[in-house]
Amino acid sequence: MNSVASEPRLIGLDWGTSSLRAFLIGGTGEVLDVVSAPQGIMHVEGRDFDAVFHRLVQPWLRGRVLPIIASGMITSRNGWRETPYIRVPSGAEELARNLVTHEASGGVRLWFVTGMTTERDGAPDVMRGEEAQIVGATGADMGDGVYVMPGTHSKWITVAGGRIEDYATYMTGEIFGALKSHTILGTLMTDGGFSSEGFHLGAEAGLSGGGELLHRLFNVRTLPLFGRIGPEMTADYLSGLLIGTEIGAAAGGLDGATITIVGRGDLAERYAMALALAGLKSRSAPENIVARGHFLIARAAGLVS
Amino acid sequence: MNSVASEPRLIGLDWGTSSLRAFLIGGTGEVLDVVSAPQGIMHVEGRDFDAVFHRLVQPWLRGRVLPIIASGMITSRNGWRETPYIRVPSGAEELARNLVTHEASGGVRLWFVTGMTTERDGAPDVMRGEEAQIVGATGADMGDGVYVMPGTHSKWITVAGGRIEDYATYMTGEIFGALKSHTILGTLMTDGGFSSEGFHLGAEAGLSGGGELLHRLFNVRTLPLFGRIGPEMTADYLSGLLIGTEIGAAAGGLDGATITIVGRGDLAERYAMALALAGLKSRSAPENIVARGHFLIARAAGLVS
């Protein structure tokens, strides 16, 4: 636990599919305390979201009343309360106007931040939770520009005039897992540390491959079969090939731009490497930007002053 | 069993990963009899290929000596006898010169047709078995041109001057299975008859999508989520999207060409539909072309006159 530096003003919940985090937030949007739990919406016994919620935030509510704001998959069909998407372009103001209020047990009131939808090439795209992170990032001096949020389903988000202008989802992470575990491509892979060489070769193939992904994936089998890459490089070659293909598609035409990477750790570093190979600059967004997003949305809604 | 119309001259074996077929072949390359068995190389108990072989062809060898030729994954690392690939461009002559002889039990001699390899964008590609089918198709009046062999791993093969000039593998079929069974995309699918509408919408998205496959796959989730396509259309939308993406990549620049489809049934029909959407003509290769391929290779090798 961090020491409490100022008076708590808000509780923010980032409640996703596989886990959730709760933030105790001060009067300038700073994080005073944070707790996390493994009860993402797919792991809540008996779908008793109310019980998980109370267990997590109760210690912060003793003797106090605080506004509570929640974002993420918790507002999806499989969550606590389904809320309608709002359309891009939207930012903190639009999200604030579309907060959905909900009364939990014990008379505790929550405000749900809804997700955002867009339309591209005749098909809709969806997100729930990322919009609060991006609102936080723009408030944390990251400003306008292009953001990438690596993950199971990567999001590429364009921010203009302080609002989310448009975005697109890429299923890169989930497809990596399915191909590695459930196709012939995994059979020639051996474990080991990160193979920078394998990743770079794959990323270069992906960046230049365009529509040839279904063919180039077969190289993940043939290259180790012919001894061109080692079995210990093969998983990272596949990772590079998919991330490179994603960047080639999502960042085409962004020559020389700086991409802001939201997230930390190994996956964020892979994106930074592949962005550099693509001739793009990158930087990292600060941690816990979702709490700042909750604060900015709550302030725009008049829940905190 | 077919009636025996002329004297048998050759036995041909098409021995793949999941099944095998044996052909009794006459003096003009015609099929006199055919038997099949489920003992593809991954399903041979104790890897006793010799026993499977004898059980299958013994009835044809009573009181006769016939040359026997075998092609397919049976010559791979996990098969009966691994043989080295030959390079494209190659045809019946080159395959005949590179036959690998093998003595089975009882003094019965086989000739293995080896596979072909090519190199593209710094990576090798491989096939074992398709080369004998294509040799057969060119001998069956299909001639030069572009062939597609739909399947788990589709092959696109260019024939020029009666030889296989080059080819590329697309993992479309295997990736369809992995995505349908092991990602979130399968969760919104319901069974039903073939949805032509779903397939066409998907194929159009694939044909126009180029490098955007990792993004467009997410539409397989969002379109039914928004009620834009029915759950019973969704699997066929995914099928169309992948096949359309494959054709867009493999047949780019072939405007107005006729593509020969090797194979029958539902999958071949899907390729014909998607090729038409791409503005290409298509036709079907005759059945059992692999037996004709065996005959032509055997004749080039002097095993039949």
Image (cartoon, coloured by chain):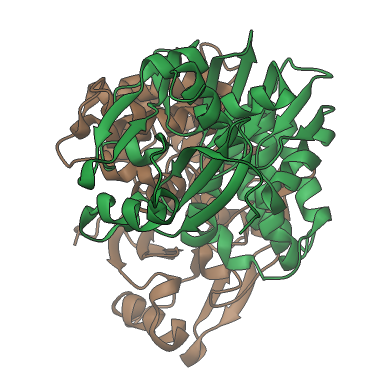
Chain colours: A green, B brown
Residue at 63% across / 73% down in the picture? B82
Most distant residue in the front direction = A63
- Residue B136 seen in this snapshot: yes
Residue at 32% across / 29% down in the picture? B237
Q: Nearer the viewer, residue B137 or B214?
A: B214
Q: Is residue A224 left or right of residue B218?
A: right
Q: Nearer the viewer, residue B32 or B40?
A: B40
Residue at 73% across / 70% down in the picture? A192
Q: Please state the horizontal and vertical placement of residue B269, each as a whole percent of the image.
A: 30, 31
Quarter of the picture holding the N terminus of chain B? bottom left
Please tell me whether residue A220 is drawn above or below residue B89 in the rendered image. below
Q: Nearer the viewer, residue A90 or B189?
A: A90
Most distant residue in the bottom direction = B106
Most distant residue in the left direction = B192
Q: Please state the horizontal and vertical placement of residue B47, each as a whole percent of the image.
A: 46, 84
Where, by quadrant of the figure, is residue A133 drawn? Answer: top right
Where, by quadrant of the figure, is residue B210 drawn? Answer: top right
Residue at 62% across / 75% down in the picture? B101
Q: Please state the horizontal and vertical placement of residue B51, each as a whole percent of the image.
A: 39, 86
Q: Is residue A120 left or right of residue B21?
A: right
Please tell me whether residue B283 is drawn above or below residue A37 in the rendered image. above
